[in-house]
Image: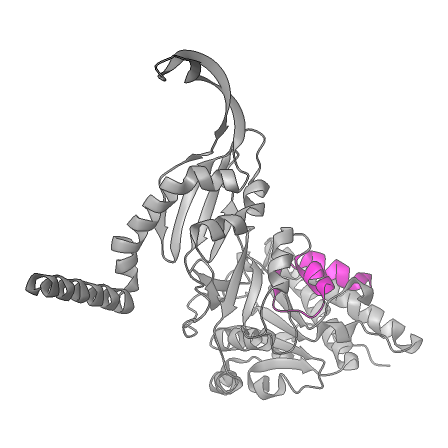
C-alpha cells in the first residue's frame, strides 16, 4: 500500500511539473516534449492518413504472397507460396518533421499526377486526422509540397504594437505562422483594405498612423464620413479632404505633385525618388482613404463628371505614384464591381490585399479574387467575435490569416499630437507646383 502511494505521489509530482513547465515556458516544453511526440505520431500514422485523405496512388508491385491450397484430411491447411503482381496503395514520401513556433512543418514528395492543390483541398481533413488547429499547403518547387501545421490558433492573443525602425515599414500585427505582420510601402506600395463595421478595419488604420507618425513622411487623409474618422488625427496630417468636392481638389494636387517629381527625377537622371540624393529627395507621401466607395457612388447624373475626375486622378496616382514616393492605403466596407470600372482598375494596381470579416461574398471576391479560392472561403469564415482577424496577401505571394494589434483611438490621437511637429505643411510639399494663372 505504501509503495502504491509513493508511486502515485511521484506521478502527481511529475504531472504537476509538466503542467507548470508547459504553463510558464511553452516554447521549451514544445521542443522537448510536445514536438517529439507529435513527430512520431505523424510519421506512424502517415500511411493510413494519406489513404483516408485520398492522397495515395495505386501502383503495381511484385509481392511475395501465400495462397491457400487444399485442406488435408488432418485439417491442416497447405499453402503455396509464389510471387505475383498486386495493386498496392503508395503514399507520398515524407521527410522528417521540423518544429516551428506554433507547430511543425514537413516536406512531401508529390506522387505523379498530383498538384499542390490536391494537398490544399485535403488540408482540413489532414488537420482533423492529426488533431491540429490548421494545415496549410505550399509548394517551394515542382514536385515538393510543404505542410505547415498549427497546433493551436496563434491569433487568439497578440502582442503590443512595436516601434517601427524602418522608413515606411510598420509591424501592425501577427501572422498565423507567428511571424510579424508588416506593411512595407517600399515593397508593396498600394494596399486595399476591406472589412465590415467592427471588423478591425479602422483599428488597422490606427496602427498605421501610430507606426508612421514618428517617421519623416507626410500623411494625407481622405475621410468621406465628413471627417469624423481622421479629424482627431489632423495634427499629424498634412492635408485632409472630407467631401468628394474636396477630394477632387486634393487628388488634383497629388497628380500635380507627382508630375513635378517626375520632372525632378528626369533632371537628376533618376528612375525614381529613392535614386535622388538625400539633399534634394522630397518627403514620401502616404495617402489614407476611408470609405472608398463614397468616391464612386453616384446619386444623380450631375455627379458623373465629379466621379470621373476622382476616379481618373486616383487611378493615375496608383499607376505612377510608387516611383515618386506616393503610396495608397484604401479602406472600405464594401468594394464591388458595381461601383464602376474605376474601382476594378484601382484594385488591379493594389497588390497589397487585406480582407477582414465582410457582409457580402462579392467584397471578398473583389479583394481576394485573384488569390487562392480558399482565401475567400477563409475570409467569409471569420467570426464576428474576433475583430482584427483578416486574410492578408503576403509579400511572398502567399496568403495568411493575421490579426492586427489592438490600437485604441486614444493611442492614435496621442501619437498624432506627439509627433505633430513632423507633419510638413501641404504648402511646403507643393511649393514647386505650377501656380494657376490668374487673369
**Coordinates of residue 299 in the picture (x, y in percent):** 87, 78
Q: Is residue 392 left or right of residue 320?
A: left
* The one of 173 and 278 positioned closer to us in this rendering: 173
**Coordinates of residue 267 in the picture (x, y in percent):** 63, 57
The residue lying at 75 percent from left, 72 percent from top is 293
Check if residue 346 falls in the magenta segment: yes
The residue lying at 81 percent from left, 67 percent from top is 339
Q: Which residues are magenta?
A: 340-368
The residue lying at 7 percent from left, 61 percent from top is 3
Q: Is residue 351 visible?
A: no
**Coordinates of residue 73 in the picture (x, y in percent):** 38, 12
Quadrant housing the C terminus: bottom right
Instruction: Find the residue positioned furthest to the right.
Output: 301
Check if residue 100 falls in the magenta segment: no
Q: Is residue 118 left or right of residue 169?
A: right
Q: Is residue 305 visible?
A: yes
Number of numbered labels in the structure image: 0
* The one of 367 and 430 positioned closer to us in this rendering: 367
Quadrant housing the N terminus: bottom left
* The one of 163 and 217 positioned closer to us in this rendering: 163
**Coordinates of residue 205 in the picture (x, y in percent):** 57, 75
Q: Does residue 174 sit above or below 237 in this rendering?
A: above
Amino acid at each position: 500500500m505504501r509503495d502504491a502511494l509513493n508511486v502515485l505521489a511521484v506521478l502527481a509530482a511529475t504531472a504537476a511539473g509538466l503542467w507548470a513547465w508547459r504553463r510558464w515556458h511553452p516554447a521549451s516544453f514544445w521542443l522537448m516534449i510536445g514536438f517529439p511526440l507529435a513527430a512520431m505520431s505523424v510519421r506512424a500514422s502517415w500511411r493510413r492518413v494519406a489513404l483516408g485523405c485520398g492522397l495515395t496512388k495505386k501502383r503495381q508491385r511484385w509481392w511475395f504472397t501465400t495462397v491457400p491450397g487444399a485442406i488435408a484430411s488432418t485439417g491442416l491447411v497447405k499453402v503455396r507460396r509464389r510471387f505475383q503482381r498486386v495493386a498496392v496503395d503508395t503514399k507520398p514520401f515524407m521527410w522528417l518533421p521540423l518544429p516551428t513556433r506554433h507547430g511543425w512543418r514537413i516536406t512531401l514528395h508529390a506522387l505523379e499526377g498530383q498538384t499542390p492543390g490536391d494537398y490544399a483541398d485535403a488540408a482540413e481533413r489532414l488537420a482533423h486526422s492529426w488533431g491540429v488547429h490548421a494545415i496549410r499547403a505550399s509548394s517551394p518547387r515542382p514536385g515538393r509540397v510543404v505542410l505547415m501545421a498549427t497546433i493551436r490558433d496563434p491569433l487568439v492573443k497578440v502582442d503590443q504594437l512595436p516601434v517601427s525602425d524602418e522608413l515606411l515599414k510598420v509591424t501592425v500585427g501577427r501572422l498565423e505562422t507567428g511571424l510579424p505582420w508588416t506593411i512595407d510601402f517600399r515593397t508593396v506600395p498600394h494596399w486595399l483594405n476591406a472589412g465590415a463595421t467592427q471588423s478591425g478595419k479602422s483599428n488597422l488604420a490606427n496602427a498605421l498612423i501610430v507606426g508612421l507618425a514618428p517617421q519623416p513622411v507626410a500623411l494625407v487623409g481622405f475621410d468621406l464620413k465628413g471627417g469624423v474618422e481622421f479629424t482627431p488625427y489632423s495634427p499629424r496630417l498634412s492635408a485632409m479632404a472630407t467631401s468628394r468636392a474636396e477630394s477632387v481638389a486634393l487628388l488634383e494636387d497629388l497628380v500635380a505633385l507627382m508630375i513635378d517629381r517626375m520632372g525632378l527625377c528626369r533632371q537628376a537622371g533618376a528612375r525614381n525618388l529613392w535614386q535622388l540624393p538625400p539633399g534634394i529627395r522630397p518627403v514620401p507621401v502616404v495617402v489614407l482613404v476611408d470609405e472608398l466607395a463614397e468616391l464612386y457612388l453616384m446619386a444623380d447624373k450631375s455627379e458623373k463628371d465629379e466621379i470621373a475626375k476622382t476616379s481618373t486622378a486616383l487611378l493615375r496616382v496608383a499607376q505612377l505614384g510608387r516611383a515618386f514616393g506616393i503610396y495608397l492605403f484604401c479602406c472600405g466596407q464594401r468594394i464591388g464591381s458595381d461601383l464602376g470600372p474605376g474601382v476594378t482598375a484601382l484594385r488591379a494596381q493594389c497588390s497589397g490585399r487585406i480582407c477582414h470579416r465582410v457582409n457580402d461574398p462579392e467584397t471578398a471576391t473583389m479583394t481576394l479574387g485573384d488569390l487562392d479560392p480558399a482565401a475567400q472561403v477563409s475570409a467569409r469564415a471569420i467570426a464576428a467575435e474576433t475583430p482584427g482577424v483578416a486574410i492578408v496577401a503576403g509579400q511572398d505571394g502567399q496568403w495568411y490569416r493575421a490579426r492586427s494589434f489592438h490600437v485604441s483611438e486614444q493611442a492614435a490621437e496621442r501619437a498624432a499630437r506627439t509627433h505633430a511637429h513632423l507633419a510638413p505643411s501641404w504648402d511646403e510639399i507643393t511649393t514647386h507646383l505650377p501656380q494657376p494663372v490668374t487673369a
